[in-house]
Image (cartoon, grey):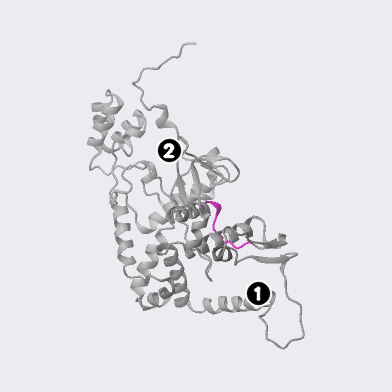
Amino acid sequence: MDIPSGLPTRAAIAEQTARILLEIKAVSFNAREPFTWTSGRKAPTYVDCRKVISFPRARTALLDFAAATVLREIGYESLDAIAGGETADGEEAEVSVRRAVITVGGAPVEPEDDDDDAIKPLPDRLIAELTAHRTLALRNALADNPAVAFAAVLHNFVLATFYRFTTSNGCLEIAIRSPTLPPQAPGLNDSASAKAIDARHDAWKVRLPKEEGDLWDTLLAFDAAEQSSLFAHCASFGVNALYEPANRYNLGRVSAHGVRRRLDQADVLAQAVGLDMVVAGWKPTVDNYLGRVTKPRILDAVRQAKGEQSVQLIDHLKKGDMAREAERLLDGTGWLPEPLRLMEVGAVEQESDGAAEALPEFLADDDEAAADADDEQPHIIAAE
């Protein structure tokens, strides 16, 4: 069976599920008096899944995630039956299992013909075959109408960007996966880029309808410039130019080759939009760079920006003082560390076409700052 490429990843499902459960306040924490689960185990957390029933869109999203997981992990054809179990008495239980489907040998059970003259619903398998023909015809028609195709992609992007609990399970299987940025990055949320994105998002949000069903007509009412601007805003949330170490903690999720390809493509994209991190408001400070690297790197930064004479002014200082003086010397110079510099597209393509190679020094040397976290501190030797 062919698995659709548009299915959300495990990580995306896990993150969105956590967001949904926290949003509807289904998760409780109590470290002092742990909860006792049905199994008898005690834990500081408890997830009350019964609350999901009161939030239709959240429930639909979670059910869609479950279906996507089944399809990706084991496939529908390997199942003889899919059934739901009651989680509560009464009407709520009926709601929670109404998507249950019973199958035999991987195919839906079709009722036997009888002799009455009543018009019965079409068999599921027949509907699937008919809609396969319709899907193929719709693909061909959409390919012949670029304007509608653009509007359809825009519609999908806006749903994913502005409407909570919306999954990628619409008729157009194109999804935006927005990576989670490191929350501990100093000054990230207060940066000029973050403020510009938030302001743009809020400006668009007030122009969009509250109900998803009204979105299509609203988008078609926008002129071409407005549609293009909204499209670019939504597409931007899918940008992932993050470096991630391919270590044991990320085993199976990222690889050194995959990270390198990601960064190479980010360089191409940055070149295309003319990204300048100095114009974007970034400058080296003790918190965001100088206090996080070794003394040789601090001196090298000053050497590149101000010359050897400035290096001699601070090379005798302790690391903390050196970092503070370097911040003052580098202010207004436009100096950037390697990960923030704009790479030439030709150089990026040439490196990508070559054989697999080690990551650049500034990427491979992940523990450099830790090695010189405080080289002026005396070493403590434990007694045996």
Frontmost residue, 234 versus 70? 70
Q: How many marks?
A: 2
Frontmost residue, 371 versus 121? 121
Identify the amino acid type marked 2: Phe
Identify the amino acid type marked 1: Ala
Q: Is residue 235 magenta?
A: no
Mostly what secondary structure, the magenta segment? loop
Measured along the vertical axis of the image, is residue 366 above or below residue 146?
above
* x and y percentages locating residue 381 in the rendered image: 43, 14
From the image, state whether disc 1 or disc 2 is nearer to you: 1
The residue sitting at 28% across, 31% down in the picture is 323
Describe the element under mark 2 as helix, strand or loop. Answer: helix
Describe the element under mark 1 as helix, strand or loop. Answer: helix
The residue sitting at 32% across, 51% down in the picture is 276
The residue sitting at 60% across, 66% down in the picture is 99
Magenta region, residue range: 3-11
Extreme residue in the bottom direction: 117
Instruction: Find residue 128 and name its label.
Output: 1
